Image (spheres, grey):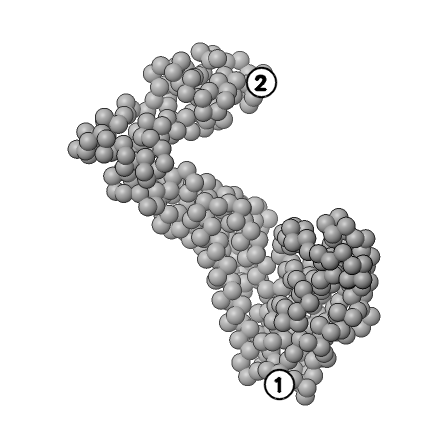
Amino acid sequence: MPASSLELLTKALSIANISVHLIAGDPAGLCQMDNRLRAMLFENFSYAEAYDFLDRRVPADTLVRMRDEFDLLYLFLRIPTDSDEVSVAGHLVSIGPFQTMQHDRDSVLAIINRARLPGRLLPDLCEYYNTAPVISEVDSLECLVLYLASGLFQRQYHPACFPDTGNALPPIQAKEFVVRKDPQIARASVEQRYSEENALLLAIASGDYEKAMACHTKLIRYHIRARADTPLEDQRHRMVIMNSLCRKTVELAGVHPLYIDELSTHFATEINRIGNPEGLDALMSDMIREYCFLVKNHAMKGYSDVTRQIVSYIDFHYTEELSLRYFAKMFNLSRTYLSDLFRKETGSTLTDFIHQVRLRHAIVLLNSSTLSVTAIATSCGYNDVNYFIRRFKKAYGLSPRQYQNTLHPSATRRGTGK
């Protein structure tokens, strides 16, 4: 079975918060199809009947669309197995559930009445719909899946629909299934949201931007009850909370408070300045990225107190004359001991670390100013501009002047540069 192709399909659809589940011939796996909705609602529900129906009715070359009695949509298809036998249809895959619009309390109540379920399920089912992704352009999604699946699995799929609502699952009748007294769907949903929030913060704490954005993508599918009178103020409220959570997270990761305060203040200002929810959505992505980069560049978790103090001192005094001898005298330690300690904890010699910090600041100046190379060298603690140029070229493969020219090819530069 082409597992890597299925992973690509799963990752592509995860951008829209759509779940992909491999049933793989196992009825037990089918309970993931509806995110365990029926298992949580009913004491005696079995997915075996639904699996048998799908196994018979989903052909090898067809993408089947289904809408169930909860007004949730699914797509089903088969992917090839490792078998060379032509008769083998392949493993069954479910895509979904998703909804075409956000269900409010009235529409959820209508679904409950239509399915002849007790009204006490309203809060739980409302919470369930709050977690289901909304896909208004179902035809576009179907075309996307057809295109991806045909390319990934080397099989020409064509679309089809089950003609009747809910005919791929046993009809939901209160007299046939015993409704649980306390389904705890709302509790499970809140627990899942908190778990995904924690996963996001852990990714930020490790500086893993890609993973953090994947966690954020999962989180935004939740429709949390409004905390303010307008959508803009509600979004601002959530952004303020996120900024505070990120700030404490990177502090625990070992980032110096001075860096944290500068970044959190910047985002606090931007949150108040931006006047539309779309702008705040974009700012959220910026926030996650910048806090991840802050950890990657400045985290000191696991360092000894001596190494922490040295790293912080270099960050804030990189223009001064710094050396192993200087810090050994500062902490009254032998140069050999301090050198070994610093290398063991940071993976770098102290001298190389000093240059890394200085050159990082040089890059910032090159990106954001038109200062001469000589002025930038001096601003970053290099009194010898030629030595600065050699260190820069060794680190980045270009001289400072060449790097400048890639940014501002037509600008006229003053000062020394090679």
Residue named by callout 1: 178
Amino acid residing under circle 2? Pro
- Quarter location, residue 89: bottom right
In the figure, 177 relative to 92: above or below? Answer: below
> Which label is found at residue 409?
2
**Tag 2 near tag 1, CB within 8 Å:** no
Residue 266 seen from this side = no
In the figure, 150 relative to 62: above or below? Answer: above
Q: Which residue of the protein is positioned furthest toward the left in this rendering?
A: 332
Question: Where residue 76 appears, x then y in whole percent?
Answer: 73, 63
Between the residue at mark 2 and the residue at mark 1, the CA separation in whole angstroms equals 73 Å
Q: Residue at x 76, y 73 (%)?
A: 53
Q: Which residue of the protein is positioned furthest toward the bottom in this rendering?
A: 175
Q: Residue at x 48, y 24 (%)?
A: 396
Amino acid residing under circle 1? Val
Question: Where residue 29 appears, x then y in whole percent?
Answer: 63, 68
Residue 125 seen from this side = yes
Q: Residue at x 59, y 82 (%)?
A: 43
Q: Quadrant of the N terminus?
A: bottom right
Seen from the viewer's position, the closer of residues 139 and 351 is 351
Seen from the viewer's position, the closer of residues 199 and 225 is 199
Mark nearer the viewer, 2 or 1:
1
Q: Residue at x 53, y 46 (%)?
A: 210
Q: Is residue 295 left or right of residue 91?
A: left
- Of the numbered discs 2 and 1, the one sitting upstream in the chain is 1
- Label 1 neighbour load within 10 Å: few <14, some 14-19, many 20+: few
- Quarter location, residue 163: bottom right
Seen from the viewer's position, the closer of residues 332 and 56 is 56
- Label 2 neighbour load within 10 Å: few <14, some 14-19, many 20+: few
| Secondary structure under the numbered disc 2 in the rendered image | loop
